[in-house]
Image: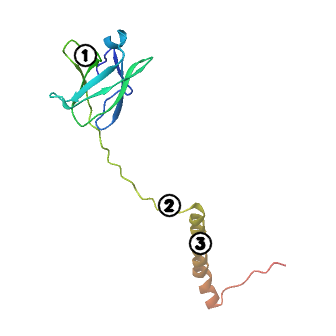
Amino acid sequence: MELVKNIFFNTDKLIENTTVKISYTGKLFEEDSEEVFVHYGFGNSWDNLNEIKMERTELGFQAEIELISNNTLNLCFRNSNNEWDNNDAQNYIFPIEKNELALIVKEEANIEPAHKLRKTYLWSKKIRIAVYKLITYLPKIISGNYKRKVNN
């Protein structure tokens, strides 16, 4: 965004469908105007033309406006004496960026608690050992070739 020395925003980019705070420290503030109004619209034809009174602070006049879906924000300022600051008839024009919608994919994780995983793992180990013993020792028991070692 092009910087203007006497207009500040509370954000580095103007994004559609958001609220933005404008601070104005231009000619009307320097001349100690009692009241200042921001006159604003959108696009080349100043759509949704509006004007709101700005609040005077130590840092300048401030106001919040809602940005609509358009390509530019157009501003000019006036005081209660109907004196205008319109950037030497050029107006103050700022680009508005589109709000990018990001597609968020949520994966459902079928992660069980650690103690359940541990129990499942232990049971699978026990089953493997039991199957191993059946395969190894059952034929020997049936044939009678199984001799148990006895320690004396």
Residue 82, numbered circle: 1
For marks 3 and 2, the one nearer the N-term is: 2
Asked whether 47 or 131 is in front, the reply is 47
Asked whether 138 or 25 is in front, the reply is 25
Residue 132, numbered circle: none
Q: Is residue 57 left or right of residue 120?
A: left
| Residue 71 location, quadrant | top left
Measuring from the top left, give residue 95's x and y in whole percent: 25, 27
Instruction: Report helix, strand or loop for mark 2.
Output: loop
For marks 2 and 1, the one nearer the N-term is: 1
Disc 2 target residue = 111
Question: Given contact means CB atoms under 8 Å apart, are the residues at marks 2 and 1 in contact?
Answer: no
Instruction: Report helix, strand or loop for mark 1.
Output: loop
Instruction: Name the residue: 22% across, 18% down.
Output: 91
For marks 3 and 1, the one nearer the N-term is: 1
Instruction: Report helix, strand or loop for mark 3.
Output: helix
Between marks 3 and 2 in the image, the one whose residue lies nearer the viewer: 2
Between marks 2 and 1 in the image, the one whose residue lies nearer the viewer: 1
Measuring from the top left, give residue 47's x and y in whole percent: 18, 32
Real-space CA distance between mark 3 and mark 1, rounded to the nearest whole angstrom? 85 Å
Asked whether 151 or 65 is in front, the reply is 65
| Residue 44 location, quadrant | top left
